[in-house]
Amino acid sequence: MISWGFINLKLLLDVLFATGFGLLLFSRVKEQRTLWLLRGYIFLVSLAWFIQRYANLPLTTKLIDAVVLACSLSLAILWQGELRRLMELLGTGRLNVILGNQPKEFRANSNTVNQLVDAAGKLSQNRRGALIVIDLGSDLRPEDFLYAGINIEAQLSTDLLINLFATDTPLHDGAVVVKGNKIISAGVILPLSRQGISRYGTRHLAALGITERFDRCICIVVSEETGTLSLSNQGKLERPITSSRLQELLSELIGSSNNQVISKSSKNRNVSSSNKTTPDIVSKINIDPGVNKTD
């Protein structure tokens, strides 16, 4: 009886851990087609485990194991970028990114969007190439880039952004990393995406590459040849866009990130809401009529 109880407990823990791991995978996958592939693969693995454990069918077990192995190799080739990123996160111990936890230190106010849009509009008008990475909570580190650039740690401002992308400065070819209301670094070299190599230039491929690897990271691109504005988010590029459209997108993305941080911090406080009302911390961002609207 003791051995059977131990076996049942072991089986229960095995099923619970496997279910939790599967739910974690499903929560991190957002693309519908990828979700279908993952469901099919997990179904095959579960079927192989069930037959091997409860049915004495050696030939069927061998066939299903062969199919699972072939599917594993196919998915490893198809998802090599995602698997590499997963190993990097595990190696650096950044479980908060894998679990999707929002860092608490991220903050941005309404002036952040206005400064970013104003700088992007002026750079676009002057046809000065630019690449601005905005960390919305991915906790970007120097090892996430091909070259970490120069540490800036300065207050975000329109004039500073424009000067960093001046053609006569050594930092203008790299990217600028912005977090909250600060410019973290400049002259950063980003990993390139492998999608759309024939369609996009180096700046757009770099914007796609960094947002493919980090889902809480967006990137503003200003084309040096045409001056068009683009915004990359979760491995997708929206282009060309106007300054007003850029302001709308940034207000939505940065505002939602702030709301997530505020909601998480408010849950940790045991404050009585019957006598007090919490003010709305994130103010609505007004569109500056003076912003340039060049494509």
Image (cartoon, rainbow, N blue to C red):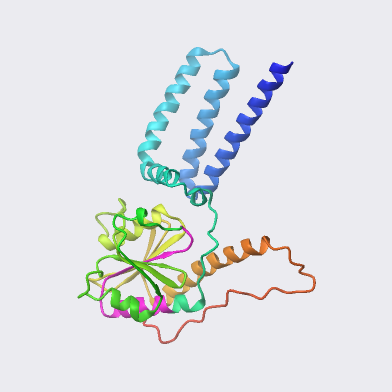
Quarter containing the C terminus: bottom left
In the image, residue 42 lies at what x, y percent?
52, 34
Q: Is residue 233 visible?
A: yes
Please identify the quarter of the rendering in which residue 139 is found. bottom left
User: Is residue 112 shown in magenta?
Assistant: no
Q: Residue at x 30, y 50 (%)?
A: 194
* Number of numbered discs visible in the structure rendering: 0
Locate residue 122, reporting x and y percent: 32, 80
Q: Can you give x and y, in whole percent of width and height, for residue 178 in the image?
A: 40, 68
Q: Give the range drawn in magenta.
A: 115-138
What percent of the width, then of the height, locates residue 135?
Answer: 44, 63
Residue at 30% across, 72% down: 228
Rendered view: 260 above or below 19? below
Q: Residue most toward the left?
A: 168
Residue 145 in the figure: left or right of residue 249? left
Q: Does the magenta stretch include residue 124?
A: yes
Question: In the rendered image, is residue 294 in sight?
Answer: no
Q: Is residue 266 left or right of residue 284?
A: right
Q: Foreground: 53 or 295?
A: 53
Residue 154's image quarter? bottom left
Q: Residue at x 69, y 17 (%)?
A: 3
* Residue sitting farthest toward the bottom: 290
175 or 186: nearer the viewer = 186
User: For the N terminus, which image quadrant?
Assistant: top right
